Image: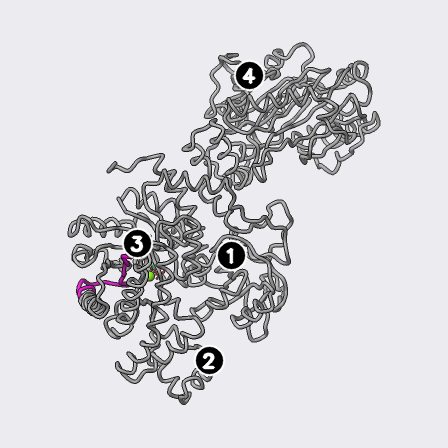
């Protein structure tokens, strides 16, 4: 350690010196590991986060003293080293120490071309990154004595000073400029967006330049042994041979391509020894650093130097395969492979994604409500979406907001965009369930259906048929088609999911309404269905008509007669769900929405319905009006409808029991779970339970077959949470519906919150959108109270969460700690939730275990 009382310290990286990621950054720590592995690393000096911070504040570093470590004619590089290489940082500066004298010397030893190339590159990067001069003035690419002269003159002209010739001055300026660049506000905001804490530090590394040219085979390059995009084993790299070609160092091709020299010859054939040595370096890194590294190297007259090694940059798909390969090779334990993958990144693997490397013309932004991306022609209504699907043309359904009537259109669409809405609006919930990319709350567009145009913030008019891409992962609306990455449910992904299942200590079920959802749920390894929203089954073409007849029935008898026709359809629905889930639990929620959702809103729709029912338009209008409510979400829906119009629940429950008997015939007995929505009082449960029990008795007698079922309550009103001890007396399980519970706890409409949520979050009123991230303080307190009170009355009550929060890591953490039995989320989030739950279990076993 070099210690001087009044100036900033630095340390040489040796095997013994104390170097830590927390003080010197990841790159410094990696280099020390390479040193410890006896790899030929050029001499390197590390400046700690604290030292760099102080340099940024104007304190001195004894650059002359530092440079003396590198001999009488030092030539060094400076590279950034923060805790995480993905946070970015200032550009590395190479060849510090180059000046007129050194240039003349290099001309003699290595030739004019090489000397010009090195000097010109240094002048350019010093001018742009340190003196912050206009990059356009220093663009000259061909290194010649004239271009070197021109660059020196341009520097002098712009700064009124000659280009610094003293290596210590050069180094000092470089260190200062890099320290200040790190402290700049824009750089801080950028790295915070990439996950860095506000006070993240920067270390700097000063390293002897291994120039990569000389007599004999010389050159410089970078190599890695996996493809970061796919994680497949592959040698990828770049090597610029100096001894074979002229001025190779002057090339500025930053991209990686299959390793070859600058004449296009296969390097493996020409320099088999170099490749063999590099492969050994790769193996050493993999085994000892337990990671796939990208290695920066030079070859100087046959002598290999390893300048740097960083984690191979990778996509989510690459990360999964690399982690699984390292575990399969016994280099890391499976548990570690699980913790190395960011759960959110897993959802990238399940859907098509916009290729981040391609260009995109973003025309609007909204809330990223359902991940994945799709390109298609704009359509502004469900009928047009269905027509488009029938023609085999992918389409993007745009609506101001969707209603249950749009479900068929959403099914037909490749992606959905709505002007209004938030994370739990109808469009968002349905799209996630269907796995359809969706962006909601795109308030900077305006849909004018009358004129058939979509107007963007800058006044651009788009028409039906125009092609756009919806990126439900980023919330962007993009004009035209873009390059896409395909989903990756490959063997590596499946292996990781199996390991996650083994590690998990909380169940993960899926919210699945249809056989297709149930199949997805099984494919993604769900432990069962945690919420089947049965009303979605009534929006199919043939059933909607019967629903309408039921709504227009003259009285209970008429209604019961119409429901008779729905019974076999529902029975068939449940039978298929039970078959697909093969003995796994299936929780069926009884009818929940207000009836008016099934009625048309438009005059045209009312006329069509009148025609279909053979009624005068005025009758239909009267009924529509009679059913309309000021606050339908707080009105006649859920259990309230179940009590006021009990025939609907009777039909559904009978269908469940009959399907149970049928499905149990072929295999393991099915034990259905029946869930009552929107409960707020014990008596509601008591009334419904009495009816269900007597129906069960009736079906048992009729069929002469015994079966079991479990009755539970959806806790989604604050009162249900507060009175959970009463309710639990009648409920074998309590499932917290955090969408409605959030809506009612905040008194905030889940369908309209998108309008101002952005500005609320920006101004810090809410830390996050509570419909997206569970509000553990407020809504969470109701969950804890409900759980505790429910357990008081019934210690074995099964607890779960089935709102859209169910798939988020934060809510899974909360539910695990509260001792919940399972979470339930949309089928496409099951793998994400599973991995998050496994990571939580590995990090902190449950208190009860
Ligand atoms: C809920 O309210 O949290 C819930 C799951 O039900 P829905 O979204 O159907 O209202
Ligand atoms: Mg609800």
Q: Could you tell me how far apart the alpha carbons at marks 1 and 4 are, in whole angstroms?
A: 48 Å
Q: Could you tell me how far apart the alpha carbons at marks 2 and 4 are, in whole angstroms?
A: 76 Å
Q: Could you tell me how far apart the alpha carbons at marks 3 and 4 are, in whole angstroms?
A: 61 Å
Quarter occupied by the C terminus: top left
Which residues lie in the magenta part? 670-687
583 is higher (above) or lower (below) than 704: above
Name the residue that disc number 2 marks: 605
Q: Sequence order check: which comes first, mark 3 or mark 1?
A: 1
Query: What element does badge 3 sit on?
Result: loop
Do the numbered discs 2 and 4 sit on residues whose CB atoms are within 8 Å?
no
Q: Which mark is residue 35?
A: 4
694 is higher (above) or lower (below) than 620: above
401 is higher (above) or lower (below) than 11: below
Where residue 515 appears, x then y in whole percent? 41, 61
Q: Determine the residue positioned at 48% across, 42% down.
A: 493
Q: Sequence order check: which comes first, mark 1 or mark 4?
A: 4
């Amino acid at each position: 350690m070099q210690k001087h009382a009044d100036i900033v310290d630095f340390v040489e990286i040796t095997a013994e010196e104390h170097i830590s990621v927390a003080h010197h950054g990841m790159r410094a720590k990696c280099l020390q590991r390479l040193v410890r592995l006896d790899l030929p690393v050029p001499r390197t000096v590390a400046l700690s986060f604290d030292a760099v911070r102080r340099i940024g504040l104007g304190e001195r570093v004894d650059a002359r003293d530092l440079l003396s470590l590198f001999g009488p004619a030092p030539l060094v590089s400076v590279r950034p080293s923060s805790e995480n290489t993905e946070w970015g940082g200032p550009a590395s500066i190479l060849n510090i120490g180059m000046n007129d004298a050194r240039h003349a010397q290099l001309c003699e030893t290595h030739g004019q071309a090489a000397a010009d190339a090195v000097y010109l590159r240094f002048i350019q990067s010093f001018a742009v990154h340190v003196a912050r001069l206009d990059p356009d003035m220093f663009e000259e690419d061909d290194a010649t004595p004239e271009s070197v002269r021109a660059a020196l003159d341009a520097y002098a002209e712009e700064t009124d000073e000659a280009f610094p010739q003293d290596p210590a001055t050069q180094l000092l300026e470089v260190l200062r400029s890099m320290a200040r660049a790190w402290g700049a506000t824009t750089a801080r905001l950028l790295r915070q967006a990439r996950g860095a804490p506000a006070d993240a530090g920067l270390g700097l590394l000063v390293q002897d330049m291994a120039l990569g040219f000389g007599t004999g085979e010389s050159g410089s390059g970078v190599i890695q042994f996996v493809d970061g995009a796919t994680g497949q084993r592959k040698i990828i790299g770049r090597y610029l041979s100096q001894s074979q070609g002229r001025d190779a160092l002057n090339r500025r091709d930053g991209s990686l391509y299959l390793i070859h020299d600058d004449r296009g010859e296969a390097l493996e054939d020409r320099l088999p020894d170099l490749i063999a040595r590099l492969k050994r370096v790769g193996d050493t890194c993999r085994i000892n650093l337990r990671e796939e590294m990208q290695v920066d190297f030079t070859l100087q007259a046959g002598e290999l130097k390893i300048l740097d090694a960083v984690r191979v940059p990778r996509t989510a798909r690459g990360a999964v395969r690399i982690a699984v390969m390292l575990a399969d090779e016994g280099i890391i334990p499976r548990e570690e492979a699980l913790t190395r993958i960011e759960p959110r990144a897993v959802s990238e693997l399940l859907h098509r994604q916009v290729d981040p490397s391609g260009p995109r013309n973003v025309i609007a932004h909204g809330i990223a409500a359902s991940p994945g991306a799709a390109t298609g022609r704009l359509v502004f209504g469900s009928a047009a979406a269905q027509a488009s699907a029938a023609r085999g043309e992918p389409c993007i359904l745009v609506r101001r907001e969707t209603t249950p009537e749009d479900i068929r259109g959403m099914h037909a669409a490749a992606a959905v965009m709505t002007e209004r809405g938030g994370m739990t609006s109808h469009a968002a919930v349905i799209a996630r369930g269907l796995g359809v990319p969706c962006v909601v709350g795109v308030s900077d567009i305006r849909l004018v259906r009358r004129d058939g145009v979509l107007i963007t913030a800058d006044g651009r008019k788009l028409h039906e048929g125009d092609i756009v891409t919806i990126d439900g992962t980023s919330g962007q609306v993009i004009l035209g088609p873009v390059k896409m990455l395909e989903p990756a449910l490959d063997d590596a992904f499946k292996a990781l999911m199996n390991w996650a299942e083994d590690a998990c200590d909380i169940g993960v079920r899926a919210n699945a309404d249809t056989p297709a959802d149930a199949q997805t749920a099984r494919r993604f390894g769900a432990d069962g269905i945690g919420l089947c929203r049965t009303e979605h089954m009534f929006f199919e073409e043939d059933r909607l008509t019967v629903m309408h007849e039921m709504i227009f029935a003259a009285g209970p008898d008429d209604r019961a007669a119409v429901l008779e026709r729905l019974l076999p359809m529902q029975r068939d629905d449940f039978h298929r769900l039970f078959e697909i889930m093969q003995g796994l639990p299936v929780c069926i929620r009884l009818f929940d929405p207000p009836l008016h959702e099934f009625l048309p809103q438009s005059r045209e729709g009312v006329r069509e319905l009148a025609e279909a029912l053979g009624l005068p338009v005025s009758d239909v209008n009267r009924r529509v009006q009679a059913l309309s409510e000021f606050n339908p979400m707080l009105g006649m829906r859920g259990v309230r409808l179940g009590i006021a119009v009990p025939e609907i629940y009777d039909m559904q429950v009978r269908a469940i029991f009959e399907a149970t008997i049928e499905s149990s015939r072929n295999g393991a007995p099915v034990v259905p779970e029946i869930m009552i929505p929107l409960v707020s009082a014990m008596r509601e449960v008591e009334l419904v339970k009495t009816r269900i029990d007597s129906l069960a008795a009736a079906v048992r007698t009729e069929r002469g077959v015994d079966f079991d079922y479990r009755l539970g309550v959806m806790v989604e009103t604050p009162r249900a949470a507060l009175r959970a001890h009463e309710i639990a007396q009648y409920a074998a399980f309590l499932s917290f519906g955090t969408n409605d519970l959030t809506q009612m706890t905040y008194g905030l409409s889940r369908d309209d919150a998108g309008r101002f949520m952005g500005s609320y979050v920006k101004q810090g009123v809410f830390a996050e959108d509570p419909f997206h991230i569970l509000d553990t303080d407020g809504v969470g307190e109701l969950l804890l109270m409900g759980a505790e009170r429910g357990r008081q009355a019934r210690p074995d009550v099964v607890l779960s969460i089935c709102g859209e929060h169910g798939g988020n890591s934060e809510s899974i953490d909360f539910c695990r700690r509260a001792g919940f039995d399972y979470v339930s989320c949309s089928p496409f989030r099951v793998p994400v939730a599973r991995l998050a739950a496994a990571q939580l279990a590995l990090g902190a076993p449950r208190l009860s275990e």
